[in-house]
Amino acid sequence: MLSKYSDFILRWRYLVVLISLVCAFALASGGKNLVFTNDYRYFFSEDNPQLLEFETLQDTYTKNDNVFIMLEPKSGNVFDKPFLAALKELTESSWQVPYSIRVDSITNFQHTYAEDDDLIVIDLVDDVENLSTSDISYIQNVALNEPLLVHRLVSAASQAAAVNITIELPGKNETTEGPEVVNFTRDMVKAFEQAHPEIDVYTTGIVIMNNAFPEASINDMKNLIPFAFAAVIIGLFLFLRSISATVSTLIVIILSIIMGMGAAGWLGFKLTPPSASAPTMILTLAVADCVHFLTTFLKSMRAGLDKFAAIKESLRINFNPIFLTSLTTVIGFLSLNFSDVPPFRDLGNITAMGVTFAFVLSIFFLPALAAILPFRVKVGMDRKTKLMQALANYVIAKRKVLLWGMGAVILAFIAIIPRNEVNDRFVEYFDESIDFRQHTDYVTEKISGLYSIQFSLEANVSGGISEPAFLQIMDDFTKWLREQPEVMHVNTVSDTFKRLNKNMHADDQQFYKLPDNRELAAQYLLLYELSLPYGLDLNDQINIDKSSTRISTTLQTLSTEQMLNFETRARNWINENAPNIGMVASAPAVIFSHLAVRNVDSMIKGTLVALAVISLILIFALRSFKLGLVSLIPNLTPIGVAFGFWAIFDSEVGLALSIVAGMTLGIVVDDTVHFMSKYLRAKREENASAIEAVRYAFENVGTALLVTTIVLAAGFLVLSLSAFELNSAMGLLTAITIVIALVIDFLFLPPLLIALEGGGHEQENRDEKELDSDLATAG
């Protein structure tokens, strides 16, 4: 059947090429449907429990998606007339930002004080032009002693102040709404900087972060894919030494990418930084199939076969191994569907489709193209084959030392895997070359952080937040929060109740405490709310029927472990001190932290399923239960060694690295399949001994494995240059795993096969003595 298939490809080669191109471009047309998502929520599945809690908070109170603009005067003091005028100007301009529903700064903070029996509510900074020195001192004193302002909208050292713009996107077109806000903000800030060169401006916030995701994706696609193509082209030409082979491989790569991405477009996939790395992965993986076909094809021509005969021989030898390696790679990437992170599922599915198309092209389109293109090959053995022969001789001669030595090294690395810990910091998904990361780090250092956690305390009865007992619990919880080392700021309505109580007692500081009467507290609140201007109400802190209140806690940049520990402590405090009060706690940082831990558990299951399926396939394909089980060793150990290596140099495993095991399992199997298929071919077709079969495998597939490993590692190392940490860490660890896999397949698998199958054969003993004698003579 394979011979007839080869004859068909060669006879109808022009038609095969034409059909392939038509199908490829038909699929590629789906690329027009691909769009980038600007919502970090796309990283969470719809049934994510922390996301559901967060959505409950967002539905109950004003949404807290925001743009945060920090102003830092070069004079080092925010409390002077020119700066306050500029801050007020920016505060008023910020109301023009699309979809803004609230703007807060120290200038429009609703300051309250008593005047006779009246409660006066005014902007803290009003009529800037007529402010006296004593007025500015008064403003500074109020701002720095107001817990709702300091470490939120003004720094304690008076060096920086901020404008916080609350955004509520309609959600009708997520691809345009977020960028519209960001672009308007950038233009507004640019105009402000030109008008006020004495002030440095830094921009961060959830909306800015959302926009950083697609910008990082587009940046990667613009920079990394061309770099990966260049690396692959150079590598292929250096190893294959054939322009036609390099060109044909390049065409297969391009077609695989556009077919994979086009299919994703037809299926409605959305692009995110992880899924945007799929073209680079498809590019890298498509090379492997082409290299195996072309290496055997060129080797056959060097052995004296004509071009058509060499194509048929290459298909005969490589069809099954290429099919198996493509199948196992697809299974490995499909295991990402166990991930709790939708963008990783998309990455797995898009790459799996690309690998499938690469397989079809490599056994259908590539042979036909090779039959059309001119190939000039010198008859004789090339240097790379001689190198593989020398390596085979070394491995065979030193097999016992390598078996025990490599085994010990592998076990040593696996033993230190537990040193790794699950940790993520979602702000650090972007490296320091990204403006968002630079600005966020600086703003966190100067005034306030992007990390937060929202607590909703529920009184469970209309108007219940005015109950003295509830207010006291809220205040005690607030005090506890402010005592925690991770906390930078706590925004709570209990501070407002205290301030109002003081105001209504002639601003007597002794009455800066909670009202002790429900009716009185409710009256204070009503009077205050009636005095507030539009857009500055308390809907961000109190729900409509006043049965629950939100406490917003700003935190330092925390790792996964630190965030989960803080959340647990807060929940425990409520359970121990207020068991009758309901609490909802969530925020983007909390969701990401839980997601990192849960994704590790999910991917362990996915990897085990992929391992089981791949093992069954190998047992069936190799037609040997024993060798199928043996193949598990070189398939699993590279991942173990790589994570042990990671434990030494980094030791933090986040969202990205949690998928590497499943993803690389399908890739590292390729080397094992190709080596063992050649090993078994020698044993079954030529009745070779284990030692002879190992030598045959090195000579016939060693070069291809070396080339594909170098190209694969180079491709994934290109990903490590990404400014998006999820991609860069994933690319680096995958490249490390692929290189380790080749080392194990070259230095550990052959001695293992000889040890398991070589005992008791006289021919093998004679081969070993001859090799040892040859090596001694050569020495």
Image (spheres, rainbow, N blue to C red):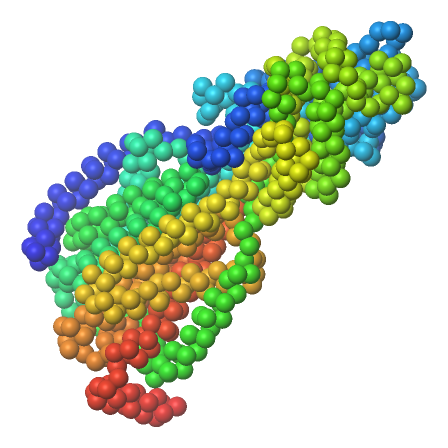
Q: Residue furthest right?
A: 134
- Name above or below for residue 370 compared with residue 138: below
Q: Would residue 11 be visible to someone looking at this image?
A: yes
Tally of numbered tags: 0
Place of residue 343 in the rendered image (x, y in percent of width and height, measured from the top left): 42, 39
Q: Residue at x 61, y 18 (%)?
A: 461
* Foreground residue among 746 and 536: 536
Using residue 308 as the reference point, say whether residue 602 is left or right of it: right
Place of residue 44 in the rendered image (x, y in percent of width and height, measured from the top left): 46, 36
Place of residue 22 in the rendered image (x, y in percent of width and height, measured from the top left): 20, 37
Q: Would residue 695 be visible to someone looking at this image?
A: no
Q: Residue at x 29, y 36 (%)?
A: 263
* Foreground residue among 538 and 220: 538
Using residue 480 as the reference point, say whether residue 461 is left or right of it: left
Instruction: Pick the quarter of the image with the C terminus.
Output: bottom left
In terms of image quadrants, where is residue 105? top right
Using residue 480 as the reference point, say whether residue 416 is left or right of it: left
Place of residue 11 in the rendered image (x, y in percent of width and height, measured from the top left): 8, 50
* Foreground residue among 158 and 336: 336
- Name above or below for residue 214 compared with residue 651: above
Q: Residue at x 50, y 62 (%)?
A: 417
Instruction: Pick the quarter of the image with the N terminus.
Output: bottom left
Q: Residue at x 36, y 33 (%)?
A: 269
- Name above or below for residue 21 compared with residue 729: above
